[in-house]
Image: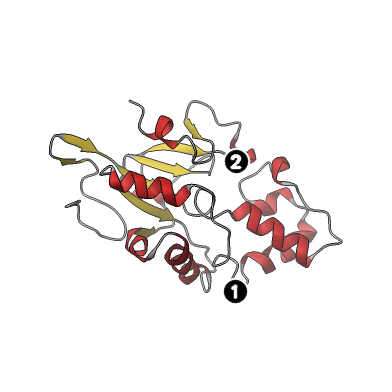
Amino acid sequence: MSHAPQWGFFYLDSRHKICDNVYMVILVDQDGPLADFERGFLMRFRMEFPHISFIPYEKRKTFYIHDDYPATALDKIESICYAPGFYRNLPPVPGAREALEELLRLGHDVRICTSPLSRYEHCVLEKYEWVDEFLGHDFTRRIILTKDKTLVRGDILIDDKPKIEGILDPLWEQVVFDMPFNRNVEKKKRLVGWSRWRGVLLES
């Protein structure tokens, strides 16, 4: 069991020991690696605006989805992302729960490190509700909500954002969770789905 102080924003120490084995604090972004934002958004967009051209998943070029669409579509995109139930009903990414549970069994300290929308009225609660349903209630105690992930102490951050910036130099190493819009990122470890997470996260 970890003896790290379980505050909601950062740790004083990131590496701990169980017996003689060093284990890691692994931070995992929620939207993308765990909750399938891309699939959830595309399903809602095509359902609500069937006569408007959509951007297929494989042609997504930018992290912020509204940057891929013309300005005239902004209000439609916001009507989806800010709507009650959107974050709550995102489909889970296959294999994510099993991987996180196995990492815990191996002794690693897994935390969900997620940035809420600035218009947080529905987003914050729904992130907790999503975790409760798809990962289990115990994982709700492992959620870290922050607008600046560089403030969070850890060894690894699994995140699909191509470039993560903040007020500090991060102490974690980013593992890029593969998406079409981040495939130009080089010189970082890359996790393509969860089926081969061991080779990426546990390699020396």
Can you name the residue that lies furthest to the right here? 51
Image quadrant where residue 41 sits: bottom right
Locate residue 157 relative to residue 184 in the image: left or right: left
Q: Give how far across and how far down residue 145 sits, in percent.
A: 40, 60
Q: Nearer the viewer, residue 178 or 171?
A: 178
Query: Which residue corresponds to the image point at 83% horizontal and 54% vertical from the top-left?
Result: 53
Q: Is residue 41 left or right of residue 110?
A: right
Residue 73 in view, yes or no: yes
Tell me the CA gap for discs 2 and 1: 26 Å
Who's the residue at 30% across and 48% down the image? Answer: 104
Confirm or deny contact between disc 2 and disc 1 (CB under 8 A): no
114 lies above or below 166: below
Image quadrant assignment for residue 22? top left
Dot 1: few (<14), some (14–19), or many (≥20) neighbours within 10 Å?
Answer: some
Say what secondary structure mark 2 lies in.
Answer: loop
Q: Which mark is residue 179?
A: 2
Q: Secondary structure at mark 1?
A: loop
Q: Disc 1 marks which amino acid? A: Pro
Evaluate whether residue 152 shows in this view: no
The residue type indicated by label 2 comes to Met
Residue occupying the point 59% across, 74% down: 84
Q: Is residue 181 left or right of residue 124?
A: right
Provide residue 196's location: percent of width, then percent of height. Answer: 47, 34
Name the quadrant of the C terminus.
Answer: top left
Q: Decide if residue 64 is on the left or right side of residue 46.
A: left
The residue labelled by disc 1 is: 84
Q: Residues within 10 Å of mark 2 (few under 14, many from 20)?
A: many
Q: Where residue 69 appears, x then y in whole percent? A: 75, 52
Is 123 located above or below residue 143 in the figure?
below
